[in-house]
Image (cartoon, rainbow, N blue to C red):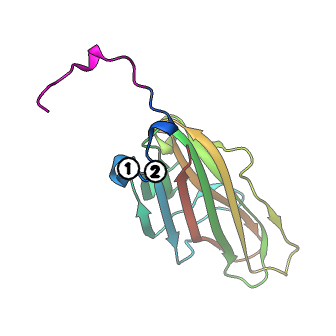
């Protein structure tokens, strides 16, 4: 029991499924936790400009396994909820947002999209993630509030930033956005 054999004296040990006892268990602590973020907002935020894509901020962070989400980080247009990739990999993003005007029936159109920044500074702006853009258009005098959901899968490297942008036009009053959620899950 006190004998020691240097690992260099052994042939390469490739463990295959047949070498493992069916009742063997590996402690969960031996696995790295996947990156997971979930934030939401229970209130719509104002101050959005007409016809401009702007970041959506969040007031409640529910889970953030790697301290990778900032509820109100500065982006190219305003503060928004920004995810900064802590581990290179493939990620699933999902977000939902409500858009409403404070003048009855004056919502014209609304869209959502995810944006990716590769410079490490969200204030430098970003590029739309293809396949994530939504759009809704209404006739004048019909819609006061609308909501949309978008999702995408994207490969990220450490330091990449991703945030949700909203866009709207309206015929009267001002528009608010943000009551919704922002979710990130590392999948590979």
Q: Residue furthest front?
A: 1
- The segment highlighted magenta reads 1-13
Report which residue position mark 2 lands on. Answer: 34
**Image quadrant assignment for residue 102:** bottom right
- Is residue 50 something that shows in the picture? yes
Dominant secondary-structure state across the stretch colored magenta: loop
Q: Residue at x 78, y 78 (%)?
A: 106
Q: Quadrant of the C terminus?
A: top right
Q: Does the stretch in magenta take in 11?
A: yes
Residue under circle 1? 26
What kind of element bears circle 1?
loop
31 or 135, nearer to the observer = 31
Give percent across and percent down for residue 181. 57, 67
Neighbours of disc 1 within 10 Å: few (<14), some (14-19), many (20+): few
Q: Residue at x 69, y 65 (%)?
A: 149
Question: Quick one: which residue is furthest to the bottom in this view?
Answer: 104
Q: Residues within 10 Å of mark 2 (few under 14, many from 20)?
A: some
């Amino acid at each position: 029991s006190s004998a020691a054999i240097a690992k260099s004296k052994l042939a390469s040990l490739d463990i295959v499924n047949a070498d493992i006892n069916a009742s063997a268990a590996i402690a969960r602590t031996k696995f790295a936790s996947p990156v997971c973020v979930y934030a939401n907002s229970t209130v719509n935020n104002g101050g959005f400009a007409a016809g401009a894509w702007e970041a959506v901020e969040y007031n409640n962070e529910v889970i953030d396994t790697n301290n990778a989400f900032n509820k109100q980080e500065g982006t190219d247009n305003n503060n928004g909820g920004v995810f900064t990739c802590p581990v290179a990999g493939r990620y699933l993003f999902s977000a939902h947002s409500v858009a409403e005007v404070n003048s009855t029936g004056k919502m014209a159109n609304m869209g959502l999209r995810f944006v990716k920044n590769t410079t490490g500074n969200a204030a430098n702006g970003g590029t739309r993630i293809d396949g994530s853009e939504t759009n809704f258009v209404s006739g004048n005098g019909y819609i006061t509030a609308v909501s949309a959901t978008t999702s995408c899968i994207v490969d990220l490297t450490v330091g990449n930033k991703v945030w949700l942008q909203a866009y709207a036009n309206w015929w009267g009053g001002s528009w608010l956005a943000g009551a919704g959620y922002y979710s990130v899950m590392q999948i590979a």
